[in-house]
Image (tube, rainbow, N blue to C red):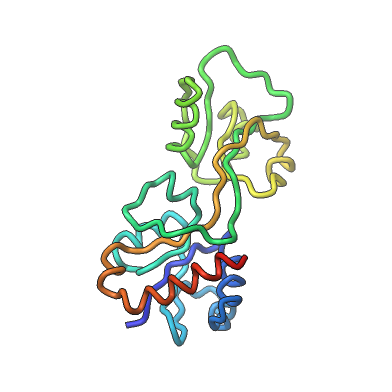
């Protein structure tokens, strides 16, 4: 059986394919996949999913290994082997508000997709806040008055600027991570270890 790899679609996809190609793997089927979410190459079975779903597929043994952002691992704490960082997908977590925003005297309202990270951040600051969970476009929350600020992942900061938001604090730096299913590493060890070592060597060279 071929190793099964779950990849995060979207933000990390292109960066991973470049990394994968640099390692000498055949990426042509992946680049030409169109809207297909499942691809088979000579060496692997590969499928694409949202980041948090990648961890679920790996945790449940549907995929042997996966590539996912470190932010997802910290937020959701899946029961997988968190093997090592990969040399792409660099970003950070940030607290942002509207420009020149005056914080209210009452309890702050913070919107975020990353509610666990947000809760921990404010707990360490000794602040109690109301956290509003959003699944996307959190930048809208301060603009429309739903929240005083947001906690969100930032790469370049361009999206924040274009929506009139400014970073008040930056914390937690991330990169993409290679993860593995705990059982797969035992059962399919002979197939997976050479692949993992190849990934590790490629990560060191970048």
Residue visible at 70% across and 34% down in the picture: 166
Quarter of the image for residue 171 reads top right
Residue 203 in percent (x, y) is at: 55, 65
Question: Which residue appears farthest toward the bottom when viewing the image?
Answer: 42
Quarter of the image for residue 138 reads top right
Quarter of the image for residue 205 reads bottom right
Q: Nearer the viewer, residue 76 or 21?
A: 21
| 12 up-or-down from 169: above or below | below
Residue visible at 51% across and 37% down in the picture: 112
Q: Where does the N terminus fall, quadrant-wise?
A: bottom left
Image mark count: 0
| 99 up-or-down from 173: above or below | above
Q: Is residue 124 left or right of residue 21?
A: left
Residue visible at 62% across and 19% down in the picture: 103
Q: In this view, does 165 lie to the left or right of 153?
A: right
Residue 27 in percent (x, y) is at: 56, 80
| 7 up-or-down from 169: above or below | below
Residue 8 in percent (x, y) is at: 49, 62
Residue 36 in percent (x, y) is at: 49, 75
Q: Is residue 94 left or right of residue 158?
A: left
Q: Where does the C terminus fall, quadrant-wise?
A: bottom right
Question: Which residue appears farthest toward the top when viewing the image?
Answer: 105
Residue visible at 52% across and 70% down in the picture: 201
């Amino acid at each position: 059986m071929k190793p099964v790899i779950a990849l995060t679609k979207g933000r990390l996809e292109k960066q991973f394919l470049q990394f994968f190609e640099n390692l000498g793997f055949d990426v042509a089927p992946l680049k030409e996949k169109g809207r297909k979410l499942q691809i088979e190459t000579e060496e692997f079975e590969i499928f694409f999913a949202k980041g948090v779903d990648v961890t679920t597929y790996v945790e449940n043994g549907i995929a042997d290994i996966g590539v996912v952002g470190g932010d997802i691992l910290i937020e959701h704490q899946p029961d997988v082997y968190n093997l090592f960082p990969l040399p792409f997908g660099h970003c950070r977590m940030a607290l942002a508000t509207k420009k020149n925003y005056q914080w209210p005297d009452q309890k702050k309202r913070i919107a975020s997709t990353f509610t666990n990270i947000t809760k921990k951040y404010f707990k360490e600051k000794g602040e109690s806040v109301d956290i509003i969970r959003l699944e996307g476009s959190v930048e809208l929350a301060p603009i429309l008055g739903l929240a005083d600020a947001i906690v969100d992942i930032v790469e370049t900061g361009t999206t924040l600027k274009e929506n009139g938001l400014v970073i008040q604090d930056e914390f937690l730096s991330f990169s993409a991570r290679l993860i593995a299913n705990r059982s797969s590493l035992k059962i399919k060890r002979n197939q997976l270890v050479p692949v993992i070592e190849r990934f590790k060597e490629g990560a060191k060279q970048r």
